[in-house]
Image (cartoon, helix red, strand yellow):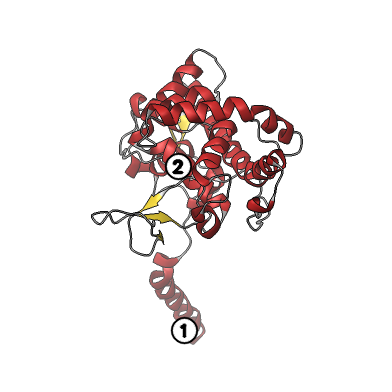
Amino acid sequence: MRLLKYPLLMAITALVLYALYFPFMDTAVPEEEPLVWHEPLEHPLRTDVMGYVRSELVRKRLAYPTPAPAKKPLPDFDAIADINEKKQAFFAYLGPHVARENTRLRALRKQLLEMQAQIEKHQPLTVQDYAFLYALYDEFRMDVAHTDEDSFNELLKRVDVLPASLVLMQAANESAWGTSRFAVEGLNFFGQWCFREGCGLVPLYRGEDQFHEVARFESAAASIRSYFYNLNTFHSYEELRDIRAQLRSRNKPVRGEDLARGLLRYSERGEDYIAEISGMIRFNCPIMQEVQQVVAISPSC
């Protein structure tokens, strides 16, 4: 009996330790998720999937497919006397960040279109697909707990590119070709506002009853990322997204001048602002195309 005493004691100890530590053991699912829903987009609910798939797997599908351009200080555009040279430098500085945002949007959209094709063929989506889908709803400001065809189609309208010609011409217009106070001090190229005290720069001519500031960004990339987010999510630019979706439905190219018609609410100047941006696109397209040989911006004028 004495010989059995210590093995029995060790077995009891092991069971106690297992009971104590089991709740904290790694019980994550394997990388290849075995669970598949066979229903179409009506199922599953958000709560069914978001706690099931490991977050790093979703982040991998959401990530930028290309590395970030090297962070560079803002050039002194005011010091460049030659107008064409100044414009080329401006496009070359901002162009890589615009291209990177569009590369990511194309990658995200490609995944959505592949999912759409599966649904149309009545092929099941994986739980990872649904987790990716709900993560995109969050990123693009859609409060969706139960995905359906309408919400999926609305997401497709938001997850799409913005032509470099439109982005760069708005940046040039709003920042005076990178020489404005807000561009120089806050790397804000699009006149974007914020509403928390200290979040940015106080406009010199702000009304007494106004409290907004012009946002300050840590990098040109952050300024451009915020601009893309605004146009692809805010209600004010729904018309722009509708124009883009209509072009897609007719297999037409998405051109900057076409999307400029959806900027009516970007400026208090309304139609005059749209006409100015459109004119800038037409006038500067040849220069952007020249820069394209060095920076892959694909202006899509």
**Mark 2 residue element:** helix
Q: Which residue sits furthest front? A: 81
Q: Is residue 213 visible?
A: yes
Pointer 2 with pointer 1, Cβ within 8 A: no
| Towards the viewer: 158 or 171 | 171
Locate residue 140 relative to residue 247 in the image: left or right: left
Label 2, on which residue?
A: 229
Q: Secondary structure at mark 1?
A: helix
Q: From the viewer's perspective, is the residue at label 2 or at label 1 nearer? A: 2
- Residue 69: mark in rendering: none
Q: Nearer the viewer, residue 81 or 189?
A: 81
Task: Report, in whole angstroms, how far the alpha carbon at label 2 lies from the one at label 1.
Answer: 68 Å
Outermost residue, left side: 209
Q: Quadrant of the C terminus?
A: top right
Residue 37 locus on image (x, y percent): 41, 32
Q: Identify the residue shown where x is 37% and y is 30%.
A: 270
Q: Where residue 248 sits in the image (x, y, percent)? A: 50, 19
**Residue 301: in sight, yes or no?**
no
In the displayed structure, 62 sits above or below 240; it is below
Q: Quadrant of residue 142?
A: top left
Location of residue 89 in the rendering, given as x and y in whole percent from the top left corner: 69, 45
Q: Amino acid at mark 1?
A: Lys
Crowd class of label 2 (few under 14; some 14 to 19; many from 20; radius 10 Å)? some
Q: Which mark is residue 5?
A: 1
In this picture, residue 199 sits left or right of residue 110: left
Vertical relation: 148 (above or below) 98: above
Q: Looking at the picture, which amino acid does disc 2 mark?
A: Tyr
